[in-house]
Image (tube, rainbow, N blue to C red):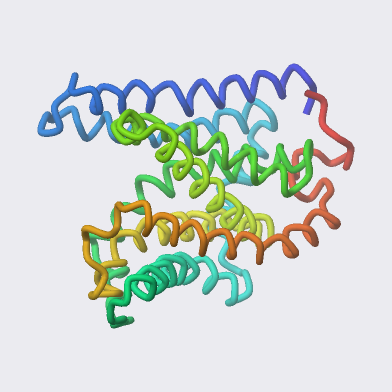
Amino acid sequence: MKGSSARNAFFLYFLIACIPPWIGWSLLVFGVIPQNSPLSGPMFLTGESASLAGFVATFVAQGGKGVLRLLTQAVHVKVPVQWWLYALLVPPIWFVSAGVVYLSLHARPIVFKPSALLALGTPTLLVPFLFGPLGEEFGWRGFLLPRFVERFSVLPACFLVGIIWSAWHWPLFYKGIIESPAQEIFFLFANITGLSFLIGTVYLRTRSLLLAMLMHWSANAAQTLIGKLLPGLPDSALGTAAFRWCVLGVLTLLVISTVPVLLRIDRGAGSHINPGNNSGREPAW
């Protein structure tokens, strides 16, 4: 990818990925468009522009072959079963473990109902797959992560995508940021950046955007299911700093456990990370 094409691709990516949702979400958050307005749905769905940006930027950088790569990775299912299990089950394990730690610290009884996981197959939790995961992952993992890996190596790449992905969400967390700036910003960036490492590991190890989408979806769904998986966990606890610290603590351990896998990927990284760079050399920026 030539330097001018790379710069144009990145400029278009951030322009398309960021501007529409920052405008749309801000109109909702600041009450310019009421939540019950017919326009509220389209404004919320401006977040889908991240995947659109991934397609446009990939076409600018690599042409039709790059777009075909994204589409192929989105239906790539021939991966070892352990990665399917990792993508689907690690997020519920993450939140259940955090809940168990919270309940233990507060001397509350622990009741676990694994049957609540069956709710993952209900329309209520399946439909959101079309919004966050499908609407974002062609951008974050499909376009941005492979190029950062080429430039910076795997660990910094996952970190940088996480930081950018966190900042991208800021309008959705605006009210919390205003009420408690330091705490809200810290948890926003720490949790989303940590999740970037987990999803990045799945994607870089399998080259399956489908699994990246599934893990993204599973992480969103786990936050909805945690109260059903652990009935003894009060709803009032979920937004507290104590519970959020438990969530972040478990996430930190999960991220640490992925580092050896990421380092192995890094040692084997080359032009196969981004098929558009067949030379194996660092791309021109």
Q: Is residue 236 left or right of residue 265?
A: left
Label tally: 0
Q: Quadrant of the C terminus?
A: top right
Q: Quadrant of residue 220?
A: bottom left
Q: Is residue 52 left or right of residue 229?
A: right
Residue at 38% over, 28% down: 21
Residue closer to the observer: 81 or 107 = 107
Residue at 59% over, 45% down: 141
- The correct choice, above or below, for 133 with respect to 215 in the image is above
- The correct choice, above or below, for 34 with respect to 260 in the image is above
Where residue 46 appears, x then y in whole percent? Answer: 35, 31
Residue at 73% over, 64% down: 261
Where residue 283 appears, x then y in whole percent? Answer: 82, 31
For the question of whether residue 81 can be seen, the reply is: yes
Residue at 58% over, 64% down: 254
Q: Quadrant of the N terminus?
A: top right
Q: Quadrant of residue 152?
A: top right
For the question of whether residue 113 can be seen, the reply is: no
Where residue 221 appears, x then y in whole percent? Answer: 34, 60
Residue closer to the observer: 134 or 249 = 249
Q: Quadrant of residue 80?
A: bottom right
Where residue 149 appears, x then y in whole percent? Answer: 74, 43
